[in-house]
Amino acid sequence: MMSVWVLLLSLLWSLVEVHSQQTFPYISFNGTTLANHSYMDLSLVGNDVTGSSDSVQCHTDLTTCCSKAQGSHRGDWYFPNGPRLLFSEDGYSIYENRTAQIIDLRRRNNPTSPVGIYRCDIPTNAVHDGTDFSVRDAPVYVGLYTASGGDVEISGYTILFEISDLSGPSPRFTLACISTGGPATTVTWTRDSTTITQGTQTVLNDPVTAQYTHTLTVTGTVEGRYGCNVSNNKPSSDLAQLLVSCKPNGIKEGIILTLFCASSIQLPH
Ligand SMILES: *[C@@H]1O[C@H](CO)[C@@H](O)[C@H](O)[C@H]1NC(C)=O
Ligand SMILES: *[C@@H]1O[C@H](CO)[C@@H](O)[C@H](O)[C@H]1NC(C)=O
Ligand SMILES: *[C@@H]1O[C@H](CO)[C@@H](O)[C@H](O)[C@H]1NC(C)=O
Ligand SMILES: *[C@@H]1O[C@H](CO)[C@@H](O)[C@H](O)[C@H]1NC(C)=O
């Protein structure tokens, strides 16, 4: 009984700890934290230089960032097509300003583009001063769109390489679903309506079109109805389903992927 309580307490403790921990870097708008790869309405972003109520803010825990007054560490925002944002004095409509542990993204003269996935690269306590340029800063992303954009939609479903042992005891293959149009904040894979958390991965392929590839590496089970649900906080979401079957049978609904595996496989449901 005692050990159960100890276990329960330590479990509660770890939940509390995880909950109270802010990971860095993170992005916020008007005091609200935005999850990595969130949607943000570009038309709400402004140029209030006296406050911080309408800038998109990128935060770090490194006290020597981000302007000369703090120390040697800097960091930058990047446009979806690659170049870094310049400063107010350079005259651009979308620009950045570095202050204490924050890099602001601001907007003036009401431009409605470029839209897409913006990146903030900022040094943090955990990631800074790497000898390799690529690990000098930590990245965090936000999708800036007007109200008519930023809706995520699944544009394709495919099976990828490394199909192995389909007829044996440890079958393995990888499914991929492609999303575009808006940031992919949350991706949920399911098989026959059970959520799968193992073997999933998301990669941003193109920040301009917001194309992401979401993969699920399936091990141990082949057949079933696989679902890929991609969503963001605009809110918008899309779901694609794929029936994976071993037998070339006559099911007519939806997309069916038939794999050449032994029909004698025991299905765990
Ligand atoms: C920021 O939040 C305040 C309320 O907390 C609200 O009055 C204000 O309009 C918001 N500003 C923007 C740009 O959303
Ligand atoms: C940029 O931030 C600094 C504070 O570090 C502030 O003094 C300055 O006014 C800001 N510049 C603009 C254009 O907002
Ligand atoms: C945000 O997502 C990217 C992958 O697209 C990842 O590399 C990065 O570490 C994430 N940043 C945070 C702060 O979670
Ligand atoms: C996809 O996920 C989102 C966010 O969790 C949810 O709101 C939506 O209902 C899901 N869509 C389907 C068809 O299950």
Image (cartoon, rainbow, N blue to C red):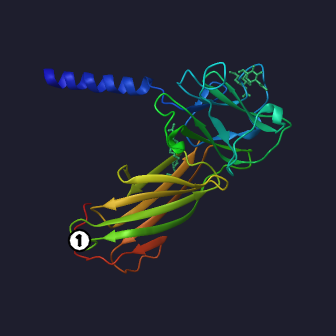
Q: Badge 1: few (under 14), some or many (20 or more) residues near its Cα, within 10 Å? A: some
| 100, above or below 206, in the image | above
| 236, above or below 259, in the image | above
Q: Position of residue 96 (x, y in %)?
A: 72, 33
Residue at the location (66% across, 24% down)? 67
User: Quarter of the image holding residue 165?
Assistant: bottom left
Q: What amino acid is labelled 1 in the image?
A: Ile
Q: What is the count of numbered marks?
A: 1
Q: Is residue 121 left or right of residue 114?
A: left
Q: Which residue, as the protein is rendered here, is positioned at the far right?
A: 109
Q: Position of residue 55 (x, y in %)?
A: 71, 30
Q: Is residue 202 left or right of residue 117?
A: left
Q: Quadrant of ligand 2?
A: top right
Q: Secondary structure at mark 1?
A: loop
| 135, above or below 169, in the image | above
**Relative depth, front residue between 53 and 24:** 24
Q: Which residue, as the protein is rendered here, is positioned at the far left?
A: 1
Q: Position of residue 207 (x, y in %)?
A: 63, 52
Q: Is residue 258 left or right of residue 266?
A: right
In which quadrant of the rendered image does the C terminus lie?
bottom left
In which quadrant of the rendered image does the N terminus lie?
top left
Q: Is mark 1 within 8 Å of ligand 4?
A: no
Tag 1 residue? 265
User: Quarter of the image holding residue 211?
Assistant: bottom right
Q: Position of residue 199 (x, y in %)?
A: 36, 54
Q: Which residue, as the protein is rendered here, is positioned at the far front?
A: 131
| 75, above or below 219, in the image | above
User: Quarter of the image holding residue 2?
Assistant: top left
